[in-house]
Image (cartoon, rainbow, N blue to C red):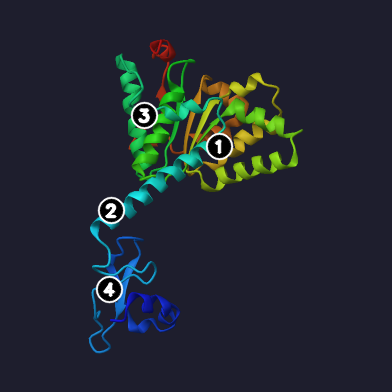
Amino acid sequence: MPSMQKLGGILPSWMKDSKNIYFFKDRFCPLCGRPLQAFKDPETGEPRSDGACPYCGWQPDSTSQAEINRTHQAQHQLDIKQAAGFLTYTSFVNDHDIFGHAFANFIANDRFTKQAKAKAEQLASQIGAGQVVHSNFHGPTGTGKTHLAVAVANQAIHDSNYRLRATVINSPKLMQERQRMINAAPDERREFNRKMAKIKQQTRLLILDDLGAESSLKTTDFDRQTISEMINDFEDKSLIITTNQVGHELHIMYGQRTISRILKHSYSNGKNQHIDFAKLSDHRALKV
């Protein structure tokens, strides 16, 4: 078989005359993950070698296991960095410390809090496995809704092998940013629009935090329409809403159509995906 350097150099001709190439369906390059290829025996149609990778240059015995492990580790660290970078860049939050919220640092001392945590862990597992989930975390302020919602995002990202793209949006913060953009410099407005477009195109899990609290701001119908359109965009993507509002208040603010979209994926195997925090104690007081 010609050297890998030569094979890489004639790759375009391979594509033009692929009948001479055997494409392995069950053997993949340990470096870049693409299918291995080999020259085909013209009489038997079988591969004439164990195959090699014309994309990155790998061939059997050309790379030690230690080098392969280092490559995999480097790619894994890059995946983690990209997932974390997307989360922090696309999110609108008041405090970036919330990105450290995890199930491991959530205090669950009573039965109701443990039940809420267990249900949130189940949601994370479903989303990380690629299922579409809609859930409403509703209840009083300070009961840990935001903590568990962000923990769901972090765990789902981990379970997806860092392929899932997630965003956390504090609803009042988004409205404040929208209002600020009215008099912002053109560069800021372009960056804001770029971020919003990225959320719409790439985010697969949206945490819409403190929905309804924006009603205390001087919001316009256009502002509320922005929230409604965002919810509508996630009709078939995962969406977790945290709110202090009761159901009929959200219906008044956003309308039946928007709320029905929230409910579309709120049941799985006949089970309600929502979490009621009404019986949970003040979670912030537990940290003191």
Instruction: Tell me the quarter of the image containing the N terminus.
Output: bottom left
Is 287 on the left or on the right of 93, as rendered? left
Across and down, in percent, residue 106 comes to 36, 22
Task: Name the residue tied to disc 2.
Answer: 69
Q: What amino acid type is highlighted by mark number 3?
A: Ala
Instruction: Sort mark 4 into few (<14), some (14-19) or many (20+) by Cα contacts within 10 Å.
Output: many
Q: What amino acid type is highlighted by mark number 1?
A: Ile
| Residue 200 visible within the image | yes
Q: Are marks 4 and 3 in contact (CB under 8 Å)?
A: no
Is 145 on the left or on the right of 70, as rendered? right
Foreground: disc 3 or disc 2: 2
Foreground: disc 3 or disc 1: 3
Instruction: Sort mark 2 into few (<14), some (14-19) or many (20+) by Cα contacts within 10 Å.
Output: few
| Residue 268 visible within the image | no
Q: Secondary structure at mark 3?
A: helix
Task: Name the residue tied to disc 3.
Answer: 120
Badge number at residue 231: 1
